[in-house]
Image (cartoon, rainbow, N blue to C red):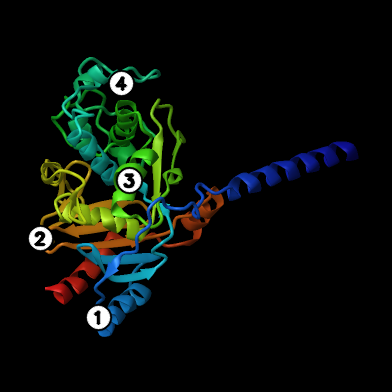
């Protein structure tokens, strides 16, 4: 009996040791070097204005680990861990939309192509002929009419998903991760590049991103039997803000047209009305708020970017949700998520300062 207990005890210790090792394994190497790092130019707020912003972040906000505000290509204020690559969560979808824009501009991808033409299907739950008529554009708009399970789903997606075949492609808006994960696979198949390679070559290098490395994109299939993996992008606050400037400046950075004006304009049109509290429209994987006149990227945990194109004003707030499974579990269990209300309040604080 004692031998059995000893064996069981050793086995349990081994299981715990493996769990700890796996739990501590980093998702990405946060110290991986950027290819072409260029420091942001600065046009700082006054000390009084900056203190007002910092006081709100530290005393009133739910949780902000990094905050950046740009006016065009110049930093008004940077606060916290602005150089730490953190998980973008669903803000990844807006970033991928920009990559689709470049691929479309270069004639590599036609967003009017159907899934049937692209050879997209599911092995466990094959698409119907009607579902295969959905286009890349409709996936970008979350109007595919395909209501299948996918990885990284929220409770709202699971509970709100329409029935299979309830709507035809293009007929109805439903924010479904299946659409977005398939877009990642389509992009890689059609361009021959990984998302990390495209981000590094097409955006990080020309924009002088200070922290992004192609290894900061990885994939998983947790929680789903879909053939299409969840791509996860880790990016710093100051690098994400540069992408906001591209949207604000009609695709231009440092005098160079990185993405066409036409793509940016098409991306930020309200193809659907949304019933969320903070956004009332959805474009090519970008959220819209007509009251504030902003375009937004939004990700779980506190990953937010607001872009006012008229004022060339970009705000980014970030929350570090962990760089390992253990770090993620600690965040979920013990830390506050960031809240979209906070970045909107910061926007209302800063806007009068730059008028």
Q: Quadrant of the C terminus?
A: bottom left
Residue under the point 15% across and 55% down: 249
Which residue does the numbered mark 3 point to in the structure image?
92
Residue 25's place in the image compared with 330, above or below, is: above
Q: Nearer the viewer, residue 106 or 169?
A: 106
Q: Nearer the viewer, residue 60 or 55?
A: 55
Relative to 301, 161 lies left or right: left
Identify the disc placed on residue 49: 1
Q: Nearer the viewer, mark 3 or mark 2?
A: 2
**Mark nearer the N terminus (1 vs 4):** 1
| Residue 147 in the image, given as x and y percentages of width and height | 28, 29
- The residue carrying pointer 4 sits among few (fewer than 14), some (14 to 19) or many (20 or more) residues within 10 Å by Cα, namely some
Residue under the point 40% across and 27% down: 226
Q: Nearer the viewer, residue 70 or 91?
A: 70
| Residue 234 in the image, given as x and y percentages of width and height | 41, 49
Which residue does the numbered mark 4 point to in the structure image?
120
């Amino acid at each position: 009996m004692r031998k059995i207990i000893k064996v069981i005890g050793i086995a349990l210790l081994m299981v715990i040791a493996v769990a700890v090792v796996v739990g501590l394994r980093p998702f990405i190497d946060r110290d991986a070097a950027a290819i072409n790092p260029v420091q942001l130019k600065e046009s700082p707020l006054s000390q009084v204005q900056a203190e007002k912003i910092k006081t709100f972040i530290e005393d009133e906000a739910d949780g902000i680990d990094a905050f950046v505000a740009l006016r065009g290509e110049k930093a008004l204020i940077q606060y916290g861990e602005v150089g730490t690559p953190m998980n973008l969560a669903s803000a990844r979808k807006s970033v991928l939309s920009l990559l689709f824009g470049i691929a479309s501009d270069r004639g590599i991808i036609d967003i009017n192509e159907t899934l049937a033409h692209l050879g997209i299907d599911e092995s466990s739950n094959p698409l119907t002929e009607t579902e295969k008529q959905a286009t890349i554009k409709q996936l970008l708009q979350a109007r595919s009419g395909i209501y299948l399970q996918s990885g990284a789903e929220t409770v709202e997606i699971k509970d709100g998903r329409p029935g299979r075949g309830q709507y035809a492609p293009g007929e109805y808006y439903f924010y479904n991760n299946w659409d977005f994960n398939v877009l990642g696979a389509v992009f890689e198949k059609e361009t021959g590049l990984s998302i990390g390679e495209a981000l590094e070559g097409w955006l990080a290098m020309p924009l002088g991103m200070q922290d992004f490395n192609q290894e900061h994109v990885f994939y998983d299939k947790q929680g789903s039997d879909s053939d299409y993996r969840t791509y996860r992008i880790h990016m710093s606050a100051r690098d994400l803000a540069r992408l906001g400037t591209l949207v604000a400046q009609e695709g231009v950075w440092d005098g160079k047209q990185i993405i066409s004006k036409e793509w940016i304009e098409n991306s930020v049109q309200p193809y659907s009305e949304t019933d969320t509290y903070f956004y009332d429209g959805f474009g090519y994987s970008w959220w819209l708020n007509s009251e504030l006149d902003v375009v937004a990227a939004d990700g779980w945990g506190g990953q937010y970017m607001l872009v006012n194109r008229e004022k060339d004003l970009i705000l980014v707030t970030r929350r570090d949700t962990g760089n390992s499974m253990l770090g993620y579990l600690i965040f979920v269990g013990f830390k506050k998520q960031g809240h979209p209300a906070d970045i909107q309040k910061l926007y209302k604080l800063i806007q009068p300062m730059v008028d």
